[in-house]
Structures are given as C-alpha cells and as structure tokens.
Amino acid sequence: MSDKIAYRGSLFYFKDSATIANLPINKDKQSEHDCQYVYIEDGILIVESGKIIEAGNYADLKNKIVDIKLVDYKGKLITPGFIDTHQHASQSAIVAAYGDKLLEWLDNYVFPAESAYSDDASADKDLNFFLDQLVRNGTTTAVSYGPLFYNASDIFFEKLKERNMRFITGNILMDENAPDSLRLSTQENYDNCEKLISKWHNTNRLSFCISPRFALACSEKMLELCGTLKKDHPDCYIQTHLDENVNEVIEVQKLFPWSKNYLDVYDHYGLVTDRTVFGHCIHTTDAELARFKSSGAIMSWCPLSNNFLGSGLFDFGRALKYTDRITLGTDWGAGNRLSMFAVMDDAYKVSMLNNVKLPSMVGWYMATFGAAKALKLESKIGNFAPGKEADFIVIDADASPYLKYRREKVSDIFEFLFILMTLGSEENIEATYIYGKPAYINQRNK
Ligand SMILES: [Zn+2]
C-alpha cells in the first residue's frame, strides 16, 4: 500500500547546480537564469517510501494530490534538514563549562565526562538524549565524534539505525596525552575501528568515520594505523581537528618537529583526502590552505565553539580564495548550542569582525546542500530534487513573538532567511522528518 503524503507550505531549497560561487546574494543581483535556489510561497512536497517524489506549486499540483493524505503547514517553511559537520556526541554533560581554553578545557572537563561512557547504561541514556536534542534542533545528518569505548560507539550506531538517520561517525581515537580512564592501547583502538567498520559501515544510512581526536592525542603509530584503515576502507570518512588554538599549534610543532606545518602531520599518514573533515582551521598558513585546494579536504567552521573557547576567528574570505568546500559545525561540547541557526548567526558575526559579509544564501547553503555536496552525499540528501531521501524540517517563524513581528517587515526570501539565521532557535522548529517519517513534532500548540 502506498504511503504517499503531500506536505503543503512554503518550500525553499538549493538546486543541484548551486555552488558558493554562483549563489545570488540579494534580489538585485539575481537574474532568472542564474537563480540557484527554489522558493515557492505556496508549495507542495510529495513524499513516498522515504523519498521525494515531487516539489512544486500548490496550484499546479493540487489535482495530483486529491487522493493522497495532505499535511498542512501553510504559512510555514519546509526546507531540507540541517547538516552539522562537527560535533561530539559524548560531550553533552560539559556543554557550557566555565573559563578554560582548549587544552585546559579538555583536561578539566572533557576527559572526565567522556570517561563516563565506559558505563553502557549511562552511555545509552546520554546518547539517546543527545539525539533527541539534535532532531529537536532540525539537524538530520551529522559528522560526529562517537565515544571512545567500543560498546558505547556500538550503542550509538544502534540508536542511529533505529532512527534511520543518515550519519557519519566513529569511535574517537586517542592513545597519548590522555588520562588512564580514556587511554586505550593503539592496537585496541585500531581493532575497535575494524569491528565497527565491518558491523556498521555502509549499512542502513550509516558511514564510518576514522576519528583521531587530534595530533596531540595520537602516537605516530596510531596515525599510521588510521592511514592503514583509510587504505583498507577507502570510502570511509576521516575527521579530526586542525589549527584550532595557538598553543595547540605550537605543541604539535614540538611533538612532530619534522613536519612543515600542522596539516603536514596528517598528510604524512595519508589522512588529507577529499573525504576528510577538518574542524576549525582557524590558524592556517598559506601552505596549508593550498593543500586544502589540491586535496579537496573539507573544512568545518565552528564559530560557536571558537567564540566560546576564545580560539580565534575563522577567516571565511581568505579560506574561500582556496576552497569552496567549507561547511558549518556546532562542535557540540565546546559549541554551546546544537542549533544550526545559532551557528549561522555566529558565522555572520565572526565574518563581520573580519570585514567580510556573509549573505544569507551562503549561510544556508553551507548548512544544507553545500555540506551534502562536500560530503559527496548530494545525490542522496540536501535538496528536494525527485528521488532524494526525504529528510526535511518545518520552520515556524511565528513561534517566537519578535521573529513574527520582524517577519512582517521583510520583503523577500533573502531577508527572510537572514532574520531566521540571526534570530531563529529550536523553538522555531515545528517538525523534523527523517526518511519521510516524523522524528520530532513540536508539542507547543498541541
Ligand atoms: Zn571538536
């Protein structure tokens, strides 16, 4: 029996041909032929068996939907789910921890909190809570650091499978400069990866991510084994941290005196690839940026975290001269919100501090279709082209009184997206759908 459903509301998404470079940045600079997005004020999205069947004008499609179930979100915005490219699933307990910068913050807050995931029951409870919060914030896909321990990471994959989420994750790896409670042997870390890859990689909607925490927490042998894993499983992703904090960069240089720069450490072990997501990338050299260009490696810009830990200001304008594979992450843990609205808001402010304007279209692109493209998932998620997986959210701007008031004063989609990205929050997420099924419905008015 068909499970076809039509959703009525305003539709917004980027076309397959969109890139950062060809996005219109305001109404005056847009012509019909180069319009890289679709905005339909009164639209219909038709979904069947977890896939997008069609998206179009209500007036054009109303005869097609007479016999199918209609869910009415008129006046609300239906748009693809957010993609968060950097977050730590096992750091919920220390979000908003006071007063430390990166290296001290890891010792004082993160390591004790992550140690608690050695207990399977508490890992189960925490990871479930984390995923509830994620969908409540409208995020449907993420690149995420899983817990260090095998069982807890296995539990995380199990929960993602139950929720049918498209997700990229793996057990975080560290074998040096860690407390005893978080230090596994190099071999055990490697074996855990192999077991998780054979059990979960390319099953359901899941991909495995080789996840060395950062160069300071990994021995040369551990990094070498990460390179071996990548060679043996070429379609696995890799995630790690790069150039986040000035003291971190100095320490890396001391620990790897042979390296030309921080990125060169990862490059030496075959970890700089077009499937590697590097978090932060703030204190980059020109040589590192040139390597991003030649390798196609992905940047995850995490302004909430960078501001919270006082790490520095990502220079979007400079990075863009080398690569358009720039995405956005919460860095939940150091980032103090799970909302991609909040990430876009801080990205805009950080850009202004660097004297670069961040247009609303560019912010939304990086938080949705641009991230799908960078992760090579654009044939599956990120917009409403027919055949794509139906991960979408419903945004109710009128759920917050000031946003409702401000919305009445905007005249076009560029301004509307801008006020959403700078004023929106999880209270504006009316519903989150994953593979065509509701994963979260806001109970505010129910
Ligand atoms: Zn991080």
Image: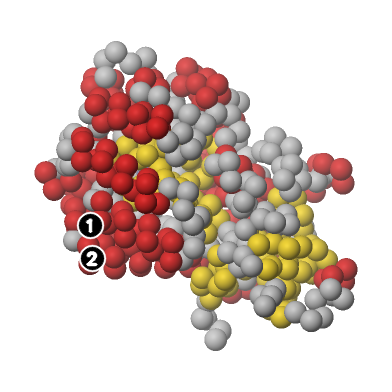
The location of residue 15, given as percent across then percent down, is 74, 48
| 273 left or right of 26 in image | left
Q: Amino acid at mark 2?
A: Ser
Front residue (pair 311, 262): 262
The location of residue 23, given as percent across then percent down, is 73, 41
Crowding at dot 1, Cα within 10 Å, few <14 / some 14-19 / many 20+, comes out as many
Relative height, residue 136 to residue 318 (above, below):
below
Residue that carries the numbered disc 2 in the rendered image: 122
Q: Is residue 196 visible?
A: yes
At x 26%, y 19%, the residue is 256
The location of residue 377, given as percent across then percent down, is 58, 46
Relative height, residue 287 to residue 218 (above, below):
above
Q: Looking at the rendered structure, which numbered label has been put on residue 117?
A: 1
Q: Quadrant of residue 312?
A: top left
Crowding at dot 2, Cα within 10 Å, few <14 / some 14-19 / many 20+, comes out as few
Instruction: Evaluate if marks 1 and 2 touch, with contact meaning CB atoms under 8 Å apart.
Output: yes
Q: Split into 4 quadrants, where in the image is the N terminus? A: bottom right
Relative height, residue 97 to residue 129 (above, below):
above
At x 33%, y 16%, the residue is 259
Q: Quadrant of residue 435?
A: bottom right
Front residue (pair 347, 233): 233
The answer to whether the beta carbon of the residue marked 2 is less than 8 Å from any atom of ligand 1 is: no
Rounded to the nearest whole Å, what is the CA distance between mark 1 and mark 2? 7 Å
The location of residue 393, given as percent across then percent down, is 60, 65
Q: Looking at the rendered structure, which numbered label has been put on residue 278?
A: none
Q: Amino acid at mark 1?
A: Tyr
At x 71%, y 80%, the residue is 69
Q: Split into 4 quadrants, where in the image is the C terminus? A: bottom right
Q: Tag 1, which secondary structure?
A: helix
